[in-house]
Image (spheres, rainbow, N blue to C red):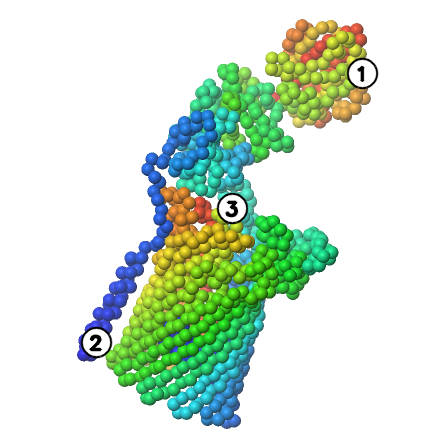
Amino acid sequence: MNDATRNKVVESGITANQVNYGGIGGATNIITRASSYRKGVKATYSLTNRSYRNRLMLIASTGMMENGVAVTFSGSRRWSQEGYVQGTFYDAWSYFFSAEKKISEAHSLSFTIFGAPTVRGKQSVATQEAYDLTDNHYYNSYWGYQDGEKRNSRVSNYHKPMMMLNHFWKIDEKSKLTTGYGYSFGRGGSTALNWYNAQDPRPDYYRYLPSYYDTKDPDEYNRLYNLWTTNDDYGQLNWDFLYFANSDEYDRIENADGQDGNTVEGIRSKYIIEERRNDHSRSTINSQYDRDVNEHIKVSAGVNVDLYKGYHFKEMSDLLGGDFWLDVDQFAERDLPEWEDAQSDLNHTNNIIEVGDRFGYDYTANVNTYSLYGQSEFTYSKVDGYLGANATYTEFWRTGNMKNGKFPDESYGDSEKQQFINYGVKGGATYKITGRHIITANGTFLTRAPNFRNSYLSARTRDHVVEGLTSETIYSGDVSYHFRSPYIKGRLTYYYTEFKDGVSVRSFYHDDLRTFVNYSMTGIDKLHTGMELGLEAKVSPTITLTGMAGTGEFIYNSRPEVTIVADNNSEVLVDSKTVYIKNFRMSGPQTVGSFGAKYFSPKYWSVGASINYIDNVYININPERRTDDALNRLYVEDPQPDMLFEQQRFHDYYTIDLFGYKSWKIKDYYINVSVNVNNLLNRTDIITGGFEQYRYNAKDLNKFPNKYFYMYGRTYFVNLSFRF
Amino acid sequence: MKNIGKTNLVILLAGLILLQFSSCVKREFDAPPIDNIPEGSIITIDSLRSMYQGADIVIDTVMSIYATVTADESTGNLYKTAFVQDTTAGLQLTYPYSGGLYQGDSVRISLEGCLLTSYGGAIQLELIHVDSNIVKQFPGQQIEPKLVTLPDLLTYEYEGQLIKLEDVEIASSELGQTWADADGKESRDITLTDCSSTQGVVIRTSGYAKFADEMLPGGKGSLIAVASQYNGAIQLTLRNLDEVMLDSNRCDGSSPNVVFFINKNFEDGSITSGGWVTKRVVGTTDWSITEFSGNSMAKVTNWNGSVNSESDVWLISPALDLSASNAPVLSFTNICNYTGANLELYISTSYDGTSLPDAANWTQVTFTLSSGSWAEQYSGDIDLSPYKVSSVYIGFRYQGSTSDGKTWELDDIKVMDN
């Protein structure tokens, strides 16, 4: 779909937006008016070795025809049996259709529909030990052989079509009204293994790795080490075992499906594949009025309504040879006294689940936002500028479709509504010192409602919200200096953004408290600040050099407060403790640089190369490791505190990329070939990121070590396109 | 105006760059407030041990000891228990769940909340919350065992410490069995002696130890163990068999490579343990255990306190596999008194182990008989070389009549091979 969505208005940073109010960090408005596409047909085939292998794209556009109609159609498929990483397959289609009818000089209507049904196998992330044992930095624990074929346990399957109807009304020479109605719906989902009363099937579970036995049992260490290093299948899923384990579990369920005396017998699966769905439906209405007040001043105002419903539930995907699955929570069954406690749905107790049935959890996230905005732009010979303001009302609530046994009174039906009123102002100016020297400055202040996901402690089971839920406040500004001459172009930018009072929720197994917990943090302040320099020099008519450098600080800027609640019974285990993460780095590179050279031949070909440098990449931290509790009886003299607090910084690295292009015109046909090679030196030892596991042991950090991502080695991307 | 603007601009940008790079340097990583170990709160194991005055103490002040783990649970000989040692003394630790402490770990033990107690007279520290009590410093620290003698150990000075003994051997009466009962998961106490002391010490081995089913070594040499005590008796705990080097000639000069097929000393109070049976061909007289000065023996008599009865009763060994032996030798001690028939010794290669003995062929073998009046007599070495087959039984036959009958006692029945 890339060709169809290439007409973008990308607004970086804070700007006067053309279509909507925009947000922090810019906005991308994809213009899908059929009349904006170049007339003709273009077909592209691409060959690559990245997440997919093949891509075929077709786009056809009529341009604005004499009858006032413009039609654009595009379709594509990206696919591979196996991508760069073992066990990952890829099959993505896309379609795009847009028609525009010019009804009169004043009115035109456009209709667009697009979507991209995508099915693909996912890649795991592992500890360094697993990468070392398999001698493969792209080790993927998600797949295993079944009947000689690689089967991935984690398959994501998305299709969320979007439809838009737009009306463009040119009221007069100075004003226009643009109104759009959008509707999108569809399915999202990702499969995963689940199991009941059985051992963990994940091959790289920490107890299956040699290190678990390191000092305590050298014989077992050696046995596992040899298995991992000599048997390629050992680190992969063992589907045969899962089917075998399921085959002998004949069980009898009394009072099944909520009916007294109803007995169901059969093979009760211990292992299953479930699909965690996140379907949605969404309607948006946007209407914007634009008016040129005079030759210097334009004003616009608009209204935006967004009605969103997210449908979250689990669906049985594969019983792996068994007859049914019983919908109970095994942790509640183990820890809580009454049989009702373990029921996922008290309205359907002892629910017998077969393929296609919903189970586990089922709730709807309702999020409605209504906003009003206005802005004005002014243009003078020396100074341009804009001012804008908006106000938004957000309401969200949870609708439970199951009555959870642990929380019968807090899970079923509509929850209380959370309501937020937010506003923002922004402004900016461009000062043209001369035509070659320009200074721009922008600033904004806004508040933002917390999002649904970070507001509920455990939306899957209950409607409890984070205590002290508040809107986030954001201050942001940037100043840039632009220089432009026939031979050299440059830009220097300083930016500063402060986020205040953010909220986050995580759920994980807490090793110290020995239970599954909901971990909510409030008062998270963040700071993003830094400088960017970009230069482009045309040293000859055919040679262009580019350079870019950026250094920034993306850091936590406060000591948030954490509350830990038991997932099982919502008992408050830790009430408001301080997390000492001020000045810890967020993930992502904080220093980047690149230098490139391109040669453009007058004969329609070009080649280029660039070298890219990345530094100051830090691991994503587990806040719990920076608390008083982590320090339990540790002193400065002990070796643990330093290890606990230290934030791992990865090695800096550089990569070299190549680029080549050639095009021919044969009669009315254009043929383009382009080649990109990334990571030319095929470096496979570059860690691009990672995270500290939330499950940790303060006295023995190696028990649950960090997990890392590695950059792909050398990859290529070859494009062949025809246009006529 | 234009020029001033440009100059200002350059100053502004330079200022911003400076601000940016200087701020990079300033921002230190945050950390929770962390304390130094309070002064005076680090004590030695010796001073901790001296705090114990006969009553349990829950330690309620902030105190720590630094020590190195000398023995852990990895060979199964210890369970929820480890030993630690510093330069002053050693100490036994117990904890509520298994694992976590390994030999060679240098640790700081935070004593607050721990229970200082004793078990069988040995001082031990109960870690109530292992995770917060133990703070590992670094691994791989090995403590050299202290070279001591048996008399040194008997002073109790080395309780809790890693020790090494030289020129010691396992008491000959123990040989022929394993370190512990691996099948029944029962612990076993094995007596260790040297060449001169009258009093030995006990090596106690758990039935769960990985080496529980290994045969006891028969020679003299050195071993490394952790010293402890149980109700006044010194008790040693082995870490692993690599540290047991008992392979030289014994104190009496005999070869260390003796293989015991039988070593029946009746000290366990059982006639039939180890697969022995008694068979009554005539009468109700049977073999039983008797004890004299702390030594248990097998005894048989047809005198019930008032009359003699007609008796023919056998004590028969389990089947011995002598097929791979060199020169197997049988020996035992026997004692008798009163008048009557002599005890007879038979060997069979056709007996089935369960029937009455007259169903099989038995060959009578002579031995040196007790002269009577409770005289203890060594049987002499009885050569079993003619019977090097896979199923050999040894039978002791007692006979008595209504008119007379002796009382016989048997002990230390051994079949050995060099």
Vertically, is A642 above or below B411? below
Task: Check the image and report above or below for B415 versus A154.
Answer: above
Instruction: Name the spot of residue A288 as percent of width and height, x first.
Output: 43, 82
Task: Give the residue number, with chain letter if any, for mark 1.
Answer: B282
Give the vertical position of A707 relative to A550 (above or below): above
The circle on residue B5 is: 2
Q: What element does badge 3 sit on?
A: helix
What's the amino acid at mark 1? Val
- Which is nearer the eye, A251 or B12? A251
In the image, A105 versus A703, the foreground residue is A105
* Left or right position of A333 against B157: right
Q: Which residue in the structure is indicated by mark 3?
A: A212
Mark 2, chain letter? Answer: B
Q: Is residue A436 visible?
A: no
User: What percent of the width, then of the height, locates residue A86?
Assistant: 54, 61
- Classify residue A161 as left or right of residue B157: right
Q: In the picture, which quadrant includes the C terminus of chain B? A: top right
- Would residue A523 be visible to someone looking at this image? yes
Q: Do tags 2 and 1 sit on the same chain?
A: yes
Amino acid residing under circle 3: Tyr
For discs 3 and 2, the disc positioned in front in the rendered view:
2
Residue A327: image quadrant is: bottom right
**Label 2 residue SS:** helix
Q: Position of residue B92 (x, y in %)?
A: 47, 31
Q: Residue at x 31, y 80 (%)?
A: A385
B285 on left or right of A532: right
Q: Is residue B32 above or below residue B214?
A: below
Numbered tag placed on residue A1 in the rendering: none
